[in-house]
Image (cartoon, rainbow, N blue to C red):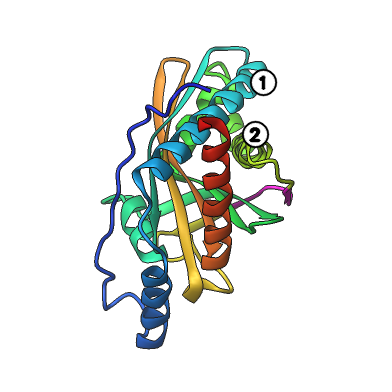
């Protein structure tokens, strides 16, 4: 593997006091405080691993749609659910569509492929082709999204697991529709942090932006970081 050249950004924002009850805000704040900031090497490693995963996902999508597909990951962040909600919020378009899959293994959590509602239809049109009438595209929307999300999320998680020499299992994809405040709902929201990736699709001459979010608790994030450190050490000896 070539040296890490991906440039990643680090971002932290103040949690909005109006979003959640005091007890939950305190718990999320404690979870965030327990998490040391990503080092530059960790950010570069995650970005490099992510781009390898997206390249493999692009190959699978290309076989499905029979046209060139490019996927890239311009940035990788670790954020709280509130911070992630701020990032995905789009003025005038609060509704989001996501493909959700849970994963389990040495590190466990929930993977989401997220698009603004209007963008998701553009992606489906690009995947199934422009020749279909709009009503047929709408009918196929959830099926096309689930298949696309399954390819991208499975490629990401499987690539990370393989490169880190670990084994993860994933659930079947589910398409969900939520607003920004509910898209990251979880039974353990108060202890959840999110590995957050911006992704860009280039398909049929259309550039479509979306997000991949890996929701994990602090112990799972810590385990992932430990495995990444071992991976970096193994390739830089």
Q: Residue at x 62, y 18 (%)?
A: 65
Q: Point out the residue furthest to the bottom here.
A: 23
The answer to whether residue 114 is above or below residue 107 is above
> Quick one: SS at disc 1?
helix
Secondary structure at badge 2 equals helix
Quick one: which residue is furthest to the top in this view? 67
Q: Which residue is mark 1?
A: 64
Where's residue 114, x and y in %?
A: 48, 46
> At 36% from the left edge and 65% from the top edge, which residue is drawn?
82
Label 2: few (<14), some or many (≥20) within 10 Å? many
Q: Percent position (x, y) of residue 51?
A: 49, 29
> Which numbered dot is residue 180?
none
Query: Do tag 1 and tag 2 residues touch (Cβ < 8 Å)?
Result: yes
Report the residue marked by disc 2. Answer: 151
| In this picture, residue 59 sits left or right of residue 39 | right
Q: Confirm whether the magenta stretch covers residue 170.
A: yes
Q: Residues within 10 Å of mark 1 (few under 14, many from 20)?
A: some
Instruction: Tell me, yes or no, if residue 143 can be seen here.
Output: no
Q: Which residues are magenta?
A: 168-175
Q: Earlier in the sequence, mark 1 or mark 2?
A: 1
Who's the residue at 53% across and 13% down the image? 68
Compared with 207, 99 (above or below) is below
Relative depth, front residue between 214 and 200? 214
Query: Which picture quadrant has residue 107?
Result: bottom right
Count of picture labels: 2
Residue 158 image-quadrant placement: top right
Which is nearer the eye, 157 or 200? 157
Q: Is residue 11 above or below residue 130?
A: below
Residue 223: % across, % down = 58, 58
Cα–Cα span, label 1 and label 2: 10 Å
- Residue 64, given in percent of the width and then of the height, sits at 67, 20
Dot in front, 1 or 2: 2
């Amino acid at each position: 593997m070539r040296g890490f050249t991906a440039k990643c950004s680090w971002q932290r924002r103040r949690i909005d006091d109006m979003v959640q009850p005091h007890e939950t805000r305190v718990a999320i704040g404690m979870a965030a405080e327990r998490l040391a900031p990503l080092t530059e090497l960790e950010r570069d490693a995650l970005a490099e691993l992510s781009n390898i995963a997206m390249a493999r996902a692009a190959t699978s999508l290309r076989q499905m749609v029979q046209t060139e597909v490019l996927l890239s990951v311009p940035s990788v962040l670790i954020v709280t659910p509130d911070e992630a909600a701020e990032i995905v919020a789009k003025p005038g378009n609060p509704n989001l569509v996501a493909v959700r899959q849970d994963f389990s293994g040495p590190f466990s959590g929930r993977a989401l492929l997220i698009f603004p509602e209007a963008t998701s239809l553009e992606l489906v049109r690009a995947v199934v082709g422009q020749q279909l009438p709009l009503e047929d595209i709408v009918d196929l929307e959830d099926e096309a999204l689930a298949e696309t999300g399954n390819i991208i999320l499975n490629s990401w998680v499987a690539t990370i697991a393989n490169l880190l020499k670990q084994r993860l299992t994933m659930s079947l994809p589910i398409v969900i529709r939520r607003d920004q405040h509910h898209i990251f709902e979880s039974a353990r929201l108060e202890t959840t942090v999110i590995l957050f990736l911006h992704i860009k699709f280039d398909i049929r001459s259309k550039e479509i932006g979306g997000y991949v979010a890996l929701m994990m608790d602090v112990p799972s994030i810590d385990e992932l970081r430990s495995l990444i450190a071992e991976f970096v050490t193994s390739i830089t000896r």
